[in-house]
Image (tube, rainbow, N blue to C red):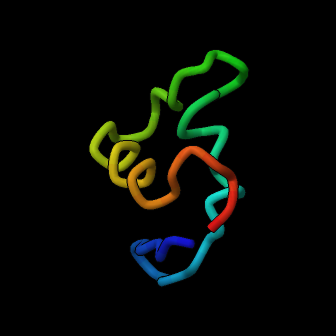
Amino acid sequence: MVVLLGGHTVGVAHCGFFQDRLSNFQGTRLPDPSMDPALVSQLNKTCGSGTGG
């Protein structure tokens, strides 16, 4: 589980909600190119390779 900070809100999201964007965006086996690479790296460290969290 990670805490997400936005311009107007603070929330919590389970890793499984966005795991595909980190490691297999649209079946490419790559991260979503619209995401900041530093954020992808940090979320991968936090979430690991599974969909739990």
Which residue is nearer to you in this view: 30 or 10? 30
Picture quadrant where residue 14 is located: bottom right
Total labels: the figure holds: 0
From the viewer's perspective, is 40 left or right of 16?
left
Write down the quadrant of residue 11 in the picture.
bottom right
Residue sitting at x 43%, y 60%: 46
Q: Residue furthest left?
A: 38
Q: Position of residue 31 (x, y in %)?
A: 51, 30
Quarter holding the C terminus? bottom right
Residue 24 lies in quadrant: top right
Query: Which residue shows up at 48% across the image and 83% down it?
Result: 10
Q: Where is residue 27 shown, x and y percent of the image? A: 72, 20
Which quarter of the rendered picture does the N terminus lie within? bottom right
Find residue 9 and report its horizontal and vertical position in percent.
49, 82
Please report the residue visible at 63 percent of the width from the left and 16 percent of the height from the top: 28
Say which of 30 and 6 sits in front. 30
